[in-house]
Image (spheres, grey):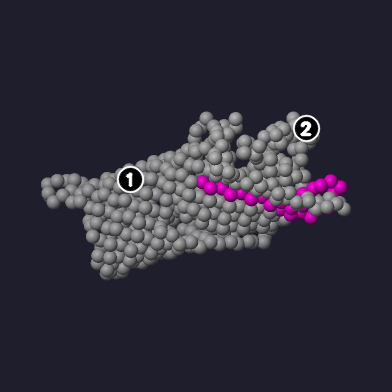
Amino acid sequence: MKKIFLLLITGLTVSVSYSQEVSDAVRFAQDNITGTARFRAMSGAFGAVGGDLSAITVNPAGSAIFNNNQVGVTLSNQNIVNDSKYFSNNQTQDKDNSFILNQAGGIFVFKDGNPNNGWNKIAIGASYENTNNFNSNTFTSGKNLNNSIANYFVDYANGIPLGDIKGISYRDQFFDEQQAYFGYYGKVIIPNTENNNNTQYKSNVPSGSGYIQENEIYTRGYNSKLSFNIATSYKDRIYLGANLNVHITDFRRSSSFFEYNNSPLTPTETISEIRFNNELYTYGNGFSFQLGAIAKVTDAFRLGIAYESNTWYELYDELSQSLYTTTETTGGPINYYDVNPNVINVYDSYTLQTPGKVTFSAAYVFGKSGLLSIDYAIKDYSNTKYKPTSDEAFRRTNSAMNSQLTSNGELRVGAEYKIKQLSLRGGYRFEGSPYKDGTTIGDTNSFSAGLGYNFGGTKLDLAYSYLERKSSQPLFSRGFTDAANITSKLNNVSLTLLFEL
């Protein structure tokens, strides 16, 4: 049996495996700068600064810098614009705007009044952060002179006996067989021979005048992290801390690909239009831990180091697909094919291990007038792994990640200047590409600014950040891998309200 069992809910099946891709793993391995408005305004350069609710997400020792209890909440508005170019100079654009609860948390400080006790402070806290907002829309359109989506279905179908495509219920097929099923029953591909033992297929889409292609992608969801923190200080010179992190992910990707060709009709029934829809839902949770230290070398100069472990996710995938095609012949009727099994494939859970990170930090505090801070983090994306590694599909993807992904560096620089109760802030962030080719996902450049006002027991902070990243996104992972060049521009405004208790 190719299925573990059949759910008693109509339309749902449980499958052994789904074709996870390198891009799926990178999506969950990457984080954006999130958190409090002060943290975002300084581009997250807080590894040696501490004293901020989001600073503990970089270096857990930072909570021991607090002198008073503090709780806060942050709301954010994110606007993302995606410009796409595909085989022409014609540029298409799509955008999305979302409003989210970005951060909430609190730190509680317990001091030892005995001056002879060097370990004179313990801080305990908890913080929630939306580490990645997946809300985004992308629209791609252009004329492809050479390749049709039929190549996608041919690539999956080759090697699969025609008898398996026709004789095994869609519910009981592996992912590869299901893709061949769509291609065959949608008339996009045809077997070399109508023999059940046939394993070779060819495109049924005519060539000659190129293909008008459109691709719409809508993504929704988030990665979030709940951190439980404890830290202590020794004579207000050495600060040590640790975090236990619970990660929650909820990701939905809806894509609709359309292809049209106006090549001359033939006496045989050939494809003129194709629409292929995919609905993917990935959800699950994970675990990681962090360790960190901050040292006051002098009253003004601080150094910090932090380690963030791998994150171990347990994930689940649900996938539904449908295909609609139109065929024409010379002087013959127009036929329409609707291949929609009305089935949601619910796949077995699997583990995704995303890479750990080491952060080195330095900061100079100018008394009560401000500070300058710099962080540098290293993360090796090639250590990303799907598990169990005994699964053949996971082994192939892990091998691809090892060869395609690389170690990268992330630089964060932040500054703050205080004028009485008013604080002015700014920052810059650069993160290298996680891919060896540097183009599948390009380098990230981000600028930020903000201000804050201290009312005494209450603080109000505002931040604006701008991020730009270029990427080259293949429309499909196999057979038909022509890519759209995407420029993503992300604008974020955050507002934080803090209370000292």
- The three-letter code of the residue at mark 1 reads Asn
Q: Nearer the viewer, residue 171 or 178?
A: 171
Residue bearing mark 2: 195
Does residue 142 appear to the left or right of 357 in the view shown?
right
Q: Which mark is residue 121?
A: none
Which quadrant holds the N terminus?
Answer: top right
Q: Which mark is residue 243?
A: 1
Where does the magenta region start and end? 259-282
Residue at the image point whose x is 70% and y is 36% from the top: 165
Question: Where does residue 281 sit, x and y in percent of width and height?
Answer: 53, 48
Q: Is residue 103 magenta?
A: no
Residue at the image point whose x is 32% and y is 47% from the top: 228
- For the residues labelled 2 and 1, the Cα–Cα distance comes to 61 Å
- Residue 52 visible: yes
Q: Secondary structure at mark 2?
A: loop
Residue 5 lies in what quarter of the image? top right
Residue 287 lies in what quarter of the image? top left
Q: Nearer the viewer, residue 205 or 296?
A: 205
